[in-house]
Image (cartoon, rainbow, N blue to C red):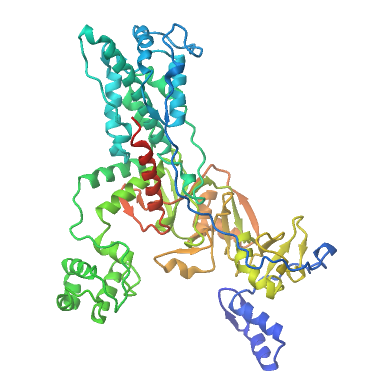
Amino acid sequence: MKFLRNKATVVPLVAITATLALGVPHAGAQNLLEMLFGGGVKRAPQGEFPPPPPKYKPKAPATTGGAKISSPSYYTYKADRLVRIDFSTLTATAQPATPQDAAFVPTATGTAFRDAIAGLGDYELYAEPDVAKALIAYYSANPDFIWVTGSGPNNRAQDAVRVLGEAASYGLTPADYTVQVPTTSASPADANAQLKELVRFEMALSARVLRYAHDAQNGRVEPNRITGYYDFPAKPLDLVGVLKTLAHTQEVRTYLESRHPQNPEYQALRVELESLQASAENEIVVDPKLVLKPGETSPELPKLLKLIARDLDDEMGGAYGAVLARFAASEVYVPDLVPVIKAVQQKQGMKGDGVIGPRTVAALAGTSKADRLLKVQVALEELRWLPSDLGSPRVFINQPAFTASYIDNGQEQLKTRAVIGRTTNQTAFFYDQIKQVDFHPYWGVPQSIIVNEMLPRLRNDPGYLDRAGYEVTDAKGTRIPSSAVNWGAYGSKIPYNVRQQPSEANALGELKILFPNKHAIYMHDTPQKAFFKKDMRALSHGCVRLQDPRGMAAAVLGTSVDYVAEKLKHGHSSEDVTRNIPVYVAYFTAWPDMSGKVEYFDDVYDRDSRLKQALDATEAVRSPSI
């Protein structure tokens, strides 16, 4: 028997011929067309729908026909306001305002410190609220200098000031940590003034060291305040403990540098930052957001043509040299230039469509120095939101690169193309733990898709889900016919769950890899294989589709692709991932490969500029802090 095949189903050709010859009722024809062209299922539902219970009698239509479930939003970032540190709780008496730490051992400077506290009465020092609180708590329980010995700053202070002054090498802003270092004076007449200057230096340096330690470990901004697409747990930092450690070590540099992420990726980005800071700007800078179609005009075009002509090889020169010479100064993208652009695109591994866009510009002109600097600085900030040790093995998904990798023992064991969420259905940035692999999975349809995409059709065609291989259940898990629900009675809150049965048409394909999270994001297969041929792959509802799902499943299960293939022969099943494997659903427009070479990617969701706004807001708050 011959079969007519498409992505969704397999239908006997004889059945189609008979249907067309004999004729069918309208509903039957609709059913057949859905099976052929999307919506049909290979595997029929098991059993019949039970009759709807009384509570599912149609309800009066609600006035919520246009209700939608909206995606997370972006916010205008507001940094915490600085507070003036209240030194009034520190006294010059023998008894501190709070009980002394049991481990506190006064030094020869202890008496001098108590005498110096009076010089803080009118001192205006501003800091973040948690820094101000920690500063008073520490010095109340440990009334002595950390950074001063005798009549001037000690070696510990000198090391701290040097580290703070090198903040730019980590993509931080040195002005955020600036401290005025006092000059040493041996004149007895200046003793009181000098002591006052020293105690103020002590407090200022401690405040800036605490800010630095926080920024190095956690970053300068709170990412979850930028957008609902960011989801990061707090990274606790004992600020009082930081001062205690610094008070009892001479290895100040080692300790402060240890607050930064300790992974090769962070170090590679630092090396790239240093190289960029020392480099010159590109000779020819082209607008990185240029989009130019044949027939359109742009002053950026001659720049691109100059770059193409500069780098012509013999083959390209023979084919297109004369055309480039003739139109070198043209700002109009004339038809004669289209074959040139197509050839250049194909040579760079892109689809040669002749449309000049950001990827074509990046391939020809590279990314400008300013843009690369921003991408690296943003990447360093984002890495501070993640664990210092990224873990091994781990799965790393970089959304702007449209890739997913399995990394173990410092080696990229698997790298596969990935599809991420559309700009209207963006994939969140977070990390989690991989828990399970589902073979021939059910697809639990998210409420947002039910409301935004299915509901408009269901209001006119309530039986659509029944025919298309979906199951509808109530809150108790009781299955009911889709046709028995008065879908017109509901807006953005649907009291039913919908799931698609395993089939060739299932949106998740043959397997999914789960890491339970509130965003309902996971990795999975897809029947839409053609998407992986595209350069720009922000095309899903938010989940991460993999070109090689079997390879990723085998990697996380610690088994072989053959084992996965055998599991798939036996229908729906699940298997737990027994190892601790973190997964990073990350967003880095600058990221090093395994050799340490930093690669740059388009900011598909325009998140770098939003982070830059948050950083600028933080700088604006900090600038008058001393």
Residue placed furthest toward the bottom: 21
Viewer-nearest residue: 559 or 192:
192
Q: Residue at x 17, y 73 (%)?
A: 329
Quadrant housing residue 53: bottom right
Using the image, determine if residue 132 lies above or below residue 596: above
Residue 46, image quadrant: bottom right
Q: Is residue 314 left or right of residue 134?
A: left
From the viewer's side, name the closer residue of 271 and 391.
Answer: 271
- 70 left or right of 116 in image: right
Residue nearest the viewer, comparing 329 with 131? 131
Residue 560 visible (yes or no): no
The answer to whether residue 529 of the structure is visible from this angle is yes
Place of residue 300 in the rendered image (x, y in percent of width and height, measured from the top left): 24, 67
Which quadrant is the C terminus positioned in? top left
On-image quarter of the N terminus: bottom right
Q: In the picture, residue 61 is in which quadrant? A: bottom right
Q: Residue furthest right?
A: 54
Front-most of residues 164 and 590:
164
Q: Position of residue 219 (x, y in %)?
A: 41, 39
Residue found at x 19% / y 61%: 284
- Give how far across and how far down residue 540 sits, in percent: 51, 63
When the figure is inspected, residue 76 is found, relative to residue 125, above or below; the finding is: below
Q: How many marks?
A: 0
Q: Position of residue 263 (x, y in %)?
A: 38, 39
